[in-house]
């Protein structure tokens, strides 16, 4: 077994692994945007959540969670401090649907978030240039699409395996 380890080039894995590169980049980007949001007493995840709520197009908390790529329990955990801070409240909708909505204080906070986000975004865009920034977004979009296709293929293969068993 130890001889198998010697044949692995771990440095190459680190240099070429998409997952590793994405996590390193995501961590750096999160720190950059967190610095911008710190003056507002928020972190990027909270700012994103407030922005999605402010957008107002999500018909339910479940839709918000899906959009953000998180599960419902994570969304509930993230909503609690925002509600405690008086930035959101819960609106009962038809059936059992509950939708978080901004309070007036939340609306003010989202305006401030947008200004802080614009500054942080401009800093990165200035470093990359407009074409470079667009190229990065396009490549990230292509990567997400590729992973979605692979996930769909895995789900189809699992469903086919279940049907044959």
Image: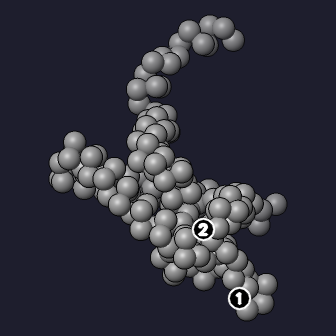
Left/right placement of residue 9 relative to residue 125 reads right
Which residue is at the front of the view, 129 or 32?
32
Q: Any mark on residue 80, and which?
A: none
**Residue 146 coordinates in the image, percent (x, y):** 45, 55
Q: What element carries label 1?
A: loop
**Residue 101 coordinates in the image, percent (x, y):** 61, 77
Using the image, determine if residue 2 lies above or below residue 111: above
Which residue is at the front of the view, 97 or 78?
78
**What quarter of the picture does the C terminus occupy?**
bottom right
Question: Which badge, 1 or 2, is on the more N-terminal residue?
Answer: 2
How many C-alpha atoms fall within 10 Å of the one at disc 2: few (<14), some, or many (≥20)? many
Residue 112 picture quarter: bottom left
Report the residue at 66% width, 8% height from top.
Answer: 2
Report the residue at 41% width, 52% height from top.
Answer: 143
Using the image, determine if residue 10 lies above or below residue 139: above
Q: What element carries label 2?
A: loop
Residue 64 picture quarter: bottom right
**Residue 93 coordinates in the image, percent (x, y):** 71, 88
**Residue 43 coordinates in the image, percent (x, y):** 53, 50
Report the residue at 28% width, 46% height from top.
Answer: 124
Which residue is at the front of the view, 90 or 136?
90
Residue 154 picture quarter: bottom right
Question: Distance between the Cα atoms at labels 1 and 2?
Answer: 19 Å
Left/right placement of residue 154 relative to residue 7 reads right
Q: In this figure, which residue is indicated by the disc labeled 2? A: 87
**What quarter of the picture does the N terminus occupy?**
top right
Which residue is at the front of the view, 65 or 55?
55
Left/right placement of residue 94 relative to residue 9 reads right
Colour convention of the picture? one colour
The mark closer to the camera, 1 or 2, is: 2
How many C-alpha atoms fall within 10 Å of the one at disc 1: few (<14), some, or many (≥20)? few
Q: In this figure, which residue is indicated by the disc labeled 1? A: 93
């Amino acid at each position: 077994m130890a001889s198998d380890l010697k044949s692995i080039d771990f440095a190459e894995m680190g240099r070429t692994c998409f997952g590793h590169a994405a996590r390193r980049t995501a961590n750096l980007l999160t720190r950059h945007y967190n610095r911008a949001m710190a003056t507002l007493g928020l972190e990027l995840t909270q700012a994103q959540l407030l922005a999605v709520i402010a957008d107002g197009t999500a018909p339910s908390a479940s839709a918000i969670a899906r959009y953000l790529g998180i599960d419902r329990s994570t969304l509930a955990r993230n909503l609690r401090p925002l509600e405690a801070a008086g930035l959101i409240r819960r609106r009962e909708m038809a059936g059992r649907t509950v939708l978080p909505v901004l309070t007036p204080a939340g609306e003010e906070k989202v305006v401030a978030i947008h200004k802080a986000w614009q500054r942080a975004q401009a800093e990165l865009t200035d470093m990359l240039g407009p074409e470079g920034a667009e190229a990065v977004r396009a490549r990230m979009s292509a990567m997400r699409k590729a992973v979605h296709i692979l996930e769909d293929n895995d789900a189809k293969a699992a469903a086919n395996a279940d049907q044959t068993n």
